[in-house]
Amino acid sequence: MTHHGPQLITYADRLAGDLPGLRALLDGPLAGAFGGVHVLPFYPPYDGADAGFDPRDHTQVDPRLGSWDDVRALADGRTVMADVIVNHVSADSERFVDVRERGEESPHAPMFLTLGSVFPLGATEEDLARIYRPRPGLPFTVMTLGGRRRLVWTTFTPDQVDIDLRTPQAWEYLTSVVDALTSGGVSMLRLDAVGYTGKEAGTDCFMTPATDAYTERIVEQAHARGAQVLVEVHGHHTQQIDIARKVDLVYDFALPPLVLHALTTGELEPLAGWLRIRPANSVTVLDTHDGIGIVDVGTSDLRPGEPGLLAPEKIDALVERIHDNSGGTSRQATGAAASNLDLYQVNCTFYDALARDDRRYVLARLLQLFVPGIPQVYYVGLLAGVNDMDLLARTGVGRDVNRHHYTPAEVEAALTHPAVAAQLTGLRLRSSHAAFAGEFAWDVDGSRGTFAWTAGDERATLAFDAADGSFEVRATQDGAERVVLTSAALG
């Protein structure tokens, strides 16, 4: 396995104000913990309808955050990952504004999807009911294009207009995005919402053969420019295994709910079952800018008849436990309770999902750090953040509970938190210890487990008990094994 250091996932503005501020944090108090950083969308407007996932200009850095020179400076000595938003652009983007004004007369008209683009002969009720969408309702918004009322394809929100990857216009656009990012110092591209790109009549319009072809084409472009590709898809766990064979990296979205299940029930077998089959070329996460994925461990309409990693009643119990652990705050941010809703996610910080239990929380992070793959740590999770109910009240967007805007004083205070200091100790070990470039072995027995990495004489081990959250991390140093971290230090 190639040794990949942990990466931080963050918005530049919500953690550090801007890109130079983010670099100062990574070179300063966070030095030695991260080998890379996934900077969430920094394109104009980074504070749009979907926190930057609705780019008006995907080839520029929002000047309020900095410049391409700042991105290149951030990439000096570390990996920078950025999003290629493959499925859609802002309804206010220059190209789509032109289509609104001129309709079919616009040279950009073929780039945007309408109902008729996919169903030129019209769509039946069955066709429409089959379309897979992570939100209630149909993925269309009535808009006037060149004086004609049209049903424009909007998978996520009316502010995000889907593009037609069957057209040269779409590829000219996407190539310009890949060029801008890679010339700006970005060496890992995260393909956002790529599963929705392969819309075809007679299918559910999700993860179709066309999606594979588009993904392959972007992977080829990225590789030609020296970049790697991470594909972001929520779905049945067998889909991740399939996708992993075709791309550089996939997310391990099954890990967070399985870790939560283990640490709230003491039952390790579902996690062990996943460890036996999961792809090694994974990016591991606990929390991200989106919610905690539940669909990733359950059954799926996309794979009928195939069981999930957790039985339905265990998933229901887990969701209820998260809501209880968070004092009910996650319930107010999840599903039908909040707009812009993702039906397959629970919106909650990971710290609140574990009832702010420092031992279990740090153990969750250590489990992530010891599992093979590239660990990515979300900024709110790193700082042991709690649900931001004020932000939720202001925006009505469920995922905002886990997207706090930190002031410099809040960051400074959080860095003194025992659970934050312990995570940083674990991250620095994962970043620097030679054992993690070697072989991984694991063993579980009841609620107890051992995860170990060995490279020659170098060794790092995590021994833990999921029932009480106790753990001990040991690692070799100068030929002798020493204790690096223990739950006893967290009270």
Image: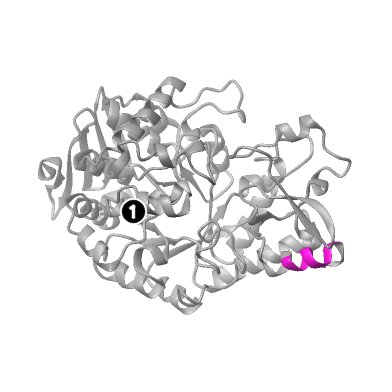
Residue marked by disc 1: 380
Towards the viewer: 478 or 61 = 61
For the point 13% across and 44% down, which residue is it? 490
One can see residue 1 in this view:
no
Question: Is 305 on the left-hand or right-hand side of 4?
Answer: right
Q: Is residue 278 magenta?
A: no
Q: Could you say where residue 311 lies in the image, as x and y percent from the top left?
A: 44, 21
- Closest to the observer, 487 or 6: 487
Q: Could you tell me residue 290's position as x and y percent?
A: 46, 48
Please say if 69 is above or below 153.
Answer: below
Residue type, label 1:
Val
Q: What's the magenta region?
A: 97-103
Q: Residue furthest right?
A: 121
State the image quarter where residue 253 is shown: top left
**Rendered location of residue 286, percent (x, y):** 37, 44
**Does 264 sit above or below residue 26?**
above
Name the residue: 59% across, 57% down.
85
Work out whether residue 21 or residue 279 is closer to the camera in this orientation and state it: 21
How far from the left and from the top, in percent, is residue 289? 44, 51
Tell me if mark 1 has few (under 14), some (14-19) or many (20+) residues whose alpha carbon lies within 10 angstroms of its own.
Answer: many
Q: Can see residue 379?
A: yes
**Helix, strand or loop status at disc 1:** helix
